[in-house]
Amino acid sequence: MEFIFTREIKADLLDVDKIFKRSLLPWWDEIDIYARKINGDLSFQLLPALVIGAYRCLGLERELSIQMANLYKTIDFANKIHLMVKDEEEGQEHNQELQFTILIGDYIFGKVFSLLLETRADKLLDSFAAMICEINEGLIVKYKLKKDLLEVLARTRGPLFNNAFKSAAELAGLAPEITGIYGELGSNLGIALELIYVHQQKQDAGDYLIKVEQLLQSLSSRIIGMEPVFEKLVQEMNREIGGSTNGL
């Protein structure tokens, strides 16, 4: 599926794909089988686009936005590989394939921190470590406590979107209060996208979109020169659920 805003950054997304593959060498031949399994996952495709949008919105350099999109894509990839490991009740066999899957996921998680240093974004190390812990806790909620979809998304996908937007705000030098608001924008926009296009639960996306519109309006009055990157996307999403935009 292609959105208006992803068409405008198609070249950037292609560069992310190239860096993603290059950063996982020399293990790509072994990793490729997992990449092909995940490649059709719309949730996996949306995240890098949102990261690039978050960085463009604040006028950050194209190269930095591509590097950070690759970084978040790599985190998401490691998460999704770990999710391929099932419980014994689901028929999971304890064999070499299982061990390799776990090792590959762990290797890729480790790669994330070296990528942070390569991107000279080491100031984000603590927030990345906290985010990964939060996502892991969310996965326990998903698989062991059997919570509803909205809580699962808030606990497993929300931290990724929130952290991606907050990292852009931090690297742009924005004040902590505005950084927090920008993070809220990321989590609400990301969850709304997942509800509409990944889970087809349009009826639950309306409140998130209303919040997105409010946050965009608040931020546009606080951030000088903020680019209108997400307005077309929000309009497209509102049309999808039969809603209306409030001044966007």
Image (spheres, rainbow, N blue to C red):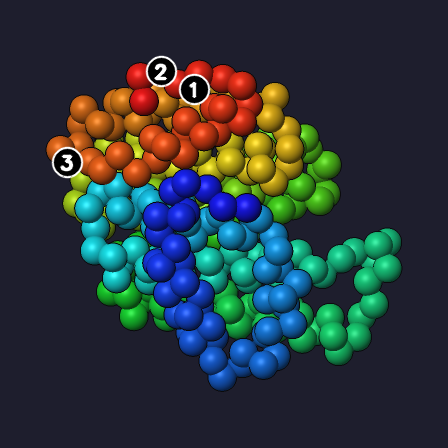
Would you say residue 40 is visible in this rendering? yes
Q: Say which of 23 and 100 sits in front.
A: 23
> Quick check: marks 2 and 1 in contact, CB under 8 Å?
yes
Residue named by callout 2? 246
Give above or below for 56 relative to 183: below
> Quick check: marks 3 and 1 in contact, CB under 8 Å?
no
Residue named by callout 3? 225
Q: Assess disc 2: are there few (<14), some (14-19) or many (≥20) residues with their C-alpha within 10 Å of its C-alpha.
A: few
Q: Amino acid at mark 1?
A: Ile
Q: Assess disc 1: are there few (<14), some (14-19) or many (≥20) residues with their C-alpha within 10 Å of its C-alpha.
A: some
Residue named by callout 1? 210
Q: Residue at x 20, y 36 (%)?
A: 226
Q: In this rendering, would 176 be left or right of 126?
A: left
Would you say residue 127 is visible in this rendering? no
Picture coordinates of residue 210 (x, y %)? 43, 19
Closer to the chain start, of discs 3 and 2, is 3
Q: Amino acid at mark 3?
A: Gly
**Can you tell which of label 2 and label 1 is closer to the viewer?**
2
Identify the residue at the far bottom of this view. 26
